[in-house]
Image (tube, coloured by chain):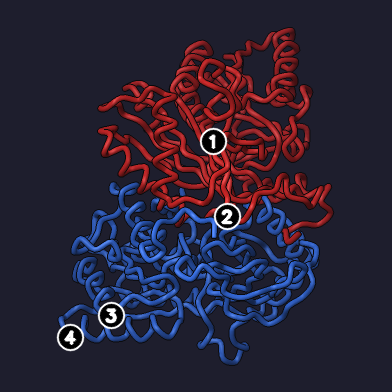
Chain colours: A red, B blue
């Protein structure tokens, strides 16, 4: 296992420590705990706060989206495992400025259990809390069960939109509605090329032959919907785009944002080859692209592969999408 | 070979096309040629222009550093091979606003030959040109031959400093001197974990056993100075830091910027583990870190591994380092 690593059990804390050391101008710890990180200027008076969290290994998700125009705080679990409800509660208290807190995270069982408990306790202590769970992975459940889907890279759009609404001074219900609007209009589908190796185990999370890829794979290596021989970029992207268009019921003249996201080990140069195919395919179908994003937005440790997310837009969402952002891992405008 | 790829011979153009499509608001082609890219607002009156270029496969190097506060234009070759002198000349003409052009690129034979020829022809047509070649790879030649070293990730600092000087309205000689000051004070050392696979060949550029790493490797897979068994992050980083400190003659109380750069397939989470070790090591040696950068700044297709660069600072360099930057691949301030 060739990794930049000391004791594998220290991987999460040492990586987080590196982040805190490198970005002390923008992030601070709560209770001197590396797993509880909030904006340096939190709590921000007059603003609804956004809390997120989840297992480690998806950087920039989740921690990387803490900053101006996105989330206010994050609690970080072990590799691929949920942080505790106490952690979520501590972050909630550190970022609440009296206008309430939105819990915004990906739909996974452990996270839901712990964050729901934290919400209950926070509310008892007088903090208003609302929750929106992101369910964008179209391959994880059929359309009729879409509220049970997992959350993957499309969560970026939920942070972006809800973060912009909060930054404009909107109230808790409005920020929640903005996030819900994203959840209703976003879809993601991933393709796995090679698996992740979790540092503490030193073993790949699954096996896949050298000439096959897995469509619909999850960001923890959850099984997808189809294994196929390696395809050309064009064939592969056309399949993925058709899948998303059907699921989101995207029609000619609709306007969408596109996110081509790398899983961690796939070079940026290849992601742009994928973006070109998405562009050509949507042009042919007369779908308009409003604001594309290409890069590593939600990864899976050292896995290779990529995902495509679409967000159907209206004027409100476009406005929020354009708003500026500044975090150590993402800047815009 | 699992890549996002159509015909491997089209890889560079398709990837560049994706970039131009995604970032049409910031980049434009010269002569409708995907290999010749300049800032959308070029030429910029009253400003010295900076031209760069080289083989493809190192993104964000070189193309990614074209934008406000960095370079003005780039010519892009095939994978790992130099663009032509005609290409460099066309970019030069497109960005020159009458205040002259600095050629700023990594020290490789093919690039030097072509860019020197372009300089000659540009000067004959009345454009003032100066050249600075970056030679930061301390492992590529011993200290006494340091002017013959290759250019690697430390070129980021040369763009940053010279770009800030040009943006402040400095003249061609001053911009050149700023770049030269970086070259005098920057050093980089890399470590390779796994090799690159060039799309057109489909084969790795070299072989390395599963339990060994290569110290001093170049960004095209050039041989390093030592193969060793896999080491802990701490042991490895201490070696690299000592190597750089000796070469750059860094003393207690010196102030340096640190760049921990990923080769392409190494996860960001691990790069922060490395940064933490650099921080601890420099703290112990009483070296002050002014402004750290951690991420993928100069890659080698799908290779895994990383490099560390140090830039010795003074007040002038610190001022330039702080200046804002906006490109599709890097933003600051």
Tell us which disc is closer to us: 1 or 4: 1
Question: Which residue is situated farthest in the front direction here?
Answer: A229
Q: Chain of mark 1?
A: A
Q: Which residue is mark 3?
A: B85
Q: Which residue is mark 2?
A: A211
Q: Position of residue A114 (x, y in %)?
A: 75, 21
Tell us which disc is closer to us: 3 or 2: 2
- Is the residue A295 above or below the residue A188 in the image? below
Q: Chain of mark 4?
A: B
Q: Quadrant of residue A32?
A: top right
Q: Quadrant of residue B249?
A: bottom right
Label 2 neighbour load within 10 Å: few <14, some 14-19, many 20+: few
3 and 2 marks on the same chain = no
CA gap, disc 3 and disc 4: 14 Å
Q: Are marks 1 and 4 in contact (CB under 8 Å)?
A: no
Q: How many marks?
A: 4
Secondary element type, mark 4: helix
Q: Chain of mark 2?
A: A
CA gap, disc 1 and disc 2: 25 Å
Q: Which residue is mark 4?
A: B124
- Is the residue A116 above or below the residue B169 in the image? above
Tell us which disc is closer to us: 1 or 3: 1
3 and 4 marks on the same chain = yes
Q: Position of residue B253 (x, y in %)?
A: 69, 68
CA gap, disc 2 and disc 4: 54 Å
CA gap, disc 3 and disc 2: 40 Å
Q: Quadrant of residue A103?
A: top right
């Amino acid at each position: 296992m060739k990794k930049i690593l000391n004791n594998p059990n220290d991987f999460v804390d040492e990586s987080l420590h590196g982040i805190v050391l490198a970005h002390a101008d923008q992030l601070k710890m709560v209770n001197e705990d590396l797993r509880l990180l909030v904006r340096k200027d939190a709590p921000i008076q007059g603003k609804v706060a956004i809390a997120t969290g989840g297992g480690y290994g998806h950087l920039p998700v989740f921690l990387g989206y803490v900053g101006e125009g996105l989330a206010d705080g994050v609690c970080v679990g072990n590799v691929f495992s949920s942080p505790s409800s106490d952690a979520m509660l501590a972050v909630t208290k550190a970022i609440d400025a009296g206008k309430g807190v939105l819990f915004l995270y990906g739909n996974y069982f452990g996270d839901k259990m712990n964050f729901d408990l934290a919400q209950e306790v926070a509310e008892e202590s007088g903090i208003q809390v609302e929750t929106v769970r992101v369910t964008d992975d179209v391959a994880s459940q059929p359309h009729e069960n879409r509220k049970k889907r997992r959350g993957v890279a499309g969560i970026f759009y939920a942070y972006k939109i809800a973060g912009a609404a909060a930054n404009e001074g909107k109230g808790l219900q409005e920020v929640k509605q903005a996030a819900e609007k994203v959840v209703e209009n976003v879809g993601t589908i991933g393709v796995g090329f090679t698996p992740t190796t979790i540092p503490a185990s030193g073993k790949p999370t699954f096996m896949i032959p050298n000439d096959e890829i897995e469509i619909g794979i999850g960001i923890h290596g959850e099984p997808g919907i189809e294994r196929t021989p390696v395809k050309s970029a064009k064939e592969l992207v056309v399949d993925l785009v058709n899948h998303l268009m059907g699921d989101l019921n995207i029609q000619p003249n609709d306007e969408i944002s596109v996110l081509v996201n790398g899983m961690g080990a796939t070079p940026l140069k290849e992601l742009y080859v994928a973006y070109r195919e998405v562009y050509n395919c949507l042009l042919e179908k007369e779908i308009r692209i409003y604001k594309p994003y290409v890069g590593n937005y939600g990864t899976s440790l050292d896995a290779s592969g990529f995902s495509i997310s679409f967000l159907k837009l209206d004027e409100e969402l476009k406005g929020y999408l354009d708003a500026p952002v500044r975090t150590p891992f993402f800047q815009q405008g």
